[in-house]
Amino acid sequence: MPDGFSAGDTAFVLISAALVMVMTPGLAFFYGGMVRAKSTLNMLAMSFLSLGIVSVLWVLYGYSLSFGPDAFGGLIGNLDFLGMRGIGLNELTGTIPITAFALFQLMFAIITPALISGAIADRAKFAAWGLFIALWVSVVYFPVAHWVFFVDGGNGGWLGDRNGVIDFAGGTAVHINAGVAGLALCLVLGKRVGFKKDPMRPHSLPLVMLGSGLLWFGWFGFNAGSALAANGVAAMAAVNTQVATGAALVGWLVYEKLKHGAFTTLGAASGAVAGLVAITPACGSVSPLGAVAIGLVAGAACAAAVSLKYRWGFDDSLDVVGVHAVGGAIGSLLIGLFATGGVGQTAKGLFYGGGWDQLGKQALGVAAVGAYSFVMSWLLAKAVDITVGFRVSEEVEVAGIDQAEHAESAYDFSAVGAGLARALPGLAAATPKPTEKPTETTPEKAAQKTEVDA
């Protein structure tokens, strides 16, 4: 290997890439537990489909558009690396091979459209969703990744490299991008049948907790790995990730208790994810105390934001807008307040003597990515809807999308029914027959019988 190569840094980034890959199945479980039982497999499959489609497109042209030499004013990469050609095994990005960097960034590209799927749970055609993934990553994610992540000495992406917007691990490119796209898709597909009328509670909170735990675990690769080296910045990013997530979990639960009177497991899982989202752009810029503050704000704010869908009338099935768009915006903006200038970069926030300059830059990043993502996502979703139809029929939605789209079901309820049927004869034989003698009935006994029947 050439001078400057680090085996330790390379191993760290490869392991981080594997951790980020685990986040997509973790997201599948998180979303899969939050939907009703009849939509479980569809929700899992929507995330796994992203693993397939984006992996192929990344090799064909995605890496080149995202991280190829700039082709037009910091907006998009050129096509020098089509098919990943022209990248030598010994070429480095920093201290690691370019191929290791490309693999790590691929995992970001995979999970971003998977995040969107939660906004349209229960009602999207699977083939139409696959078409949307291919279009969306090509038109939205790859260019935005270039804006935010591509660094070339001031000649790279127009947001990160040219205008100083700080996004350490994807608050804008991943979370605001996906959250705002989710809002656009909600508006195109419309509300679920029975929205605000029928109970649509999570069918498996244990799956939700399992999914959030896998996300939390994998997020250390997501954030710390973005240092691209096994160094102090990576260590600080990992510490900030942990403490911000814990603070957000507490913040969500406190808000939930004050507002609704209970600490729910769904709230704990959602609060943890909100904290992970919010600290993502800031983990390489703030101190642990700043991370705690960001987590507390994000936990309470995202808990409040998820109720906006009922007030404003858009059906964001699994709170993608309230958690990812709002959480990503909070984390990105608060860099302008809490950046210390002494972690992974020199820019300082308002509370550390930096004035309002960095906050203005962060607001530019939030606004630019949010506006571009919403407009393009709406247009792409509308195009898919007009050409192939994006939404399943009402009959399919009511009966259950798993059977219609996948010819499977997550749970074999027939086995439960058969077992009950086999047990019934035995139960009937063991049940004492009523006596012929009438029993005395009093108001007190009648009331007791009513309670027992109920």
Image (tube, rainbow, N blue to C red):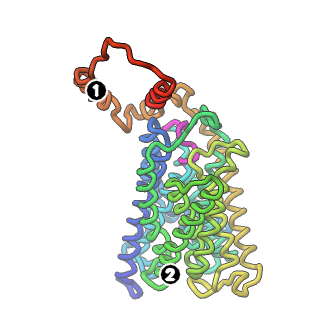
Residue at the image point whose x is 26% and y is 25% from the top = 427
Q: Where's residue 378, x and y in %? A: 67, 46
**For numbered disc 2, what is the local secondary structure?**
helix
Q: Is residue 156 left or right of residue 451?
A: right
Range of magenta residues: 117-126
- Which mark is drawn over residue 418? 1
Q: Amino acid at mark 1?
A: Ala
Query: Which of the 4 image quadrants contains residue 422?
Result: top left
Q: Position of residue 12 (x, y in %)?
A: 38, 76
Q: Position of residue 361 (x, y in %)?
A: 72, 73
> Which of pointers 1 and 2 lies earlier in the amino acid sequence?
2
Left or right, 203 with reference to 152: left
Q: Which residue is mark 2?
A: 236
- Nearer-the-camera pick, 185 or 199: 199
> What is the distance, in whole Å, between disc 1 and disc 2 at their CAs?
55 Å
- Which residue occupies 31% across, 17% down? 434
Q: Does the segment drawn in magenta span residue 287?
A: no
Give yes or no for contact between labels 1 and 2 (Cβ–Cβ under 8 Å).
no
Q: Residues within 10 Å of mark 1 (few under 14, many from 20)?
A: few
Q: Residues within 10 Å of mark 2 (few under 14, many from 20)?
A: many
In the rendered image, is residue 177 in sight? no
